[in-house]
Amino acid sequence: MNRRGYIKTGSDVYTYQVGEDAPAGQLMAADYAATSQSRPLQPLNVNGFYVYPYGENNTEPNEAKDLISTNRLLPGLIEKQIGMLYGRGPALYKESTDKNGFPAREYIQDPEIKAWLENWLETGLADDYTTYLNKCIRSFYYCEGCFSKWRFTRGSQFSRTLPVAGLEHVSVTRCRLATTENIAGRTDFEDVEFNKVLVGNWSGTGSSREYKVYPRFNYTKPLAHPSAISYIKNPTHGEEIYSFNTFYRGVKDWIQGSNLTPKYINDYLANALSARLHIIIPEAWMRSKKDMLQGICERNAGKMSEATEGSSVELEKITFGEDDVMEVGCDYHEGLLAEFTTRELKKLGQFLSGAGKNQGKYYATTSFTDENGQEQRWRIEEIPQKYKEYIEAIKSYDERADYVMLAAKGLDPSISNVSKEGVISKSGSDAYYNYLIYLNGLTIPESVVCSALNYAIKLNFPAKYASGVRIGFYRPTIAKQQDVTPENRLQNQTE
């Protein structure tokens, strides 16, 4: 029998020890080992294509998606970023300069380009152009890059039709860059080497036969294939092939911890409250019961030796309850003492457990005197349950994790609506200027998201593209309410 252990009775758990040694406690925690040292990634051979892995296990976009989507804070923050970049939606504009010579946008209407954009669904594409751009924004904020499938008009090289029928977004979780060149064993690669895109399920459960192979869009020969896939990215420092989420790697552990805090609290409430008593069994009691069991075995052996052949012999047993009888037998072994002690502990556990059902019942044990004349008896001690300290520690970690993730996303509390407990946002002035600062930093995200579509405009409408026509997002600057006439203030707007 173990000298330390526990007994579970229903929803209650009791620990025990034999003797007076201090109980050994051990903090149980999930071990997370991560190293900051990166090693060169090796290409994967898939059906003769050499695929460059996206992250160490080739599943970083998938892991980031799963981890972020289960966080209570990050999906909402990303939705705010998506909304602020999208603004009032995509709009055509012409690059120009203002009267002071600074770059400016002149938003325009172009019926020809507009007709092409609004005809995507009719030509058999998966989404309209607004949905395509919406999906590209989401890919950017999760992985800093966008995969787009180019649909070309058949025979466009030899006809007067628009060469690009439209674009379709392809999830970054399904795309990997590849090449047919044997690059196994190498440790240094360049983006230009990968001229294929494999599309499929990279989560580890898919079959290699499910992958579809597309040529990677070639800007030097854009019309060479009926369809192709381009990859536009915001370059990550030190990464040559793929772009990576700028905040995910740095706060991954915080996201994991934040996702686990509700589970820790719920598990604590469900389990820790029951493990509240510790039972100390004296050595003298163990010796006494050992002697008792040895005596029963000797008497049973004597009965068996005196019995005549064919006669039945009733051996001594130990009764713990109406339906709980322990067979002892004739030969003593240590397992008998362990079984007896376990049954006694369960009997005590049944007595201690249950609200109100044990009223009027009693449980009796016998005290013993050791060789030094000291009394020894069973002791039941309450385990300190520092409920408040534990919950407060979890809560403090959770609040810190919120601040870390918020800072990593680059969203000031005044525009994210996440701040100190009980404070939704800062002053209106802080919110206004922080919003303007944030809008001023959306140039790169917009250029990445709209890059493929702007190049499609270049192929379909080269003269208009040369004149400065582009597509972007219309984000009007919100004016201070004191600078707006009363009838035009937000609270007086019906739409």
Image (tube, rainbow, N blue to C red):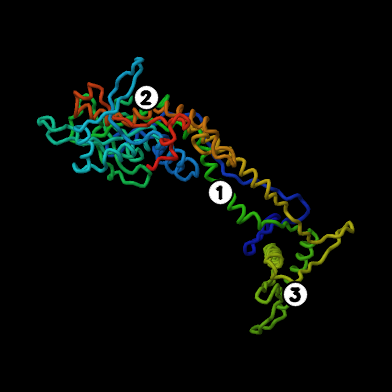
Mark 3 or 2 closer to N-term? Answer: 2
Give the amino acid type for the residue marked by disc 3 in the picture: Arg
Mark 3 or 1 closer to N-term? Answer: 1
Residue 197, numbered label: none
Give the amino acid type for the residue marked by disc 2 in the picture: Asp
Question: Regarding mark 1 in the picture, which secondary structure is present there?
Answer: helix
* Quarter occupied by the N terminus: bottom right
Taking the view exactly as shown, the residue that stands out farthest to the right is: 373
Residue hosting label 1? 262
* Quarter occupied by the C terminus: top left
The picture quadrant where one finds residue 402 is: top right
Seen from the viewer's position, the closer of residues 418 and 21 is 418
Mark 1 or 2 closer to N-term? Answer: 2
Crowd rating for badge 3 (residues with CA inside 10 Å; few <14, some 14–19, many 20+):
some
Crowd rating for badge 2 (residues with CA inside 10 Å; few <14, some 14–19, many 20+):
few
Residue 65 in the image: state x and y as whole percent: 42, 41
Query: In whole angstroms, how far apart are the C-alphas of marks 3 and 2?
Result: 82 Å
Q: Nearer the viewer, mark 1 or mark 2?
A: 1
> Residue at 70% of width from left, 81% of height from top?
307
Crowd rating for badge 1 (residues with CA inside 10 Å; few <14, some 14–19, many 20+):
some
Residue hosting label 3? 299
Residue hosting label 2? 188
Q: Up-down: is 22 above or below 185?
A: below
Residue 80 in the image: state x and y as whole percent: 44, 38
Query: In whole angstroms, how far apart are the C-alphas of marks 3 and 1?
Result: 58 Å
Question: Regarding mark 3 in the picture, which secondary structure is present there?
Answer: helix
The picture quadrant where one finds residue 192 is: top left
Question: Regarding mark 2 in the picture, which secondary structure is present there?
Answer: loop
Query: In whole angstroms, how far apart are the C-alphas of marks 1 and 2?
Result: 43 Å
Seen from the viewer's position, the closer of residues 142 and 210 is 142
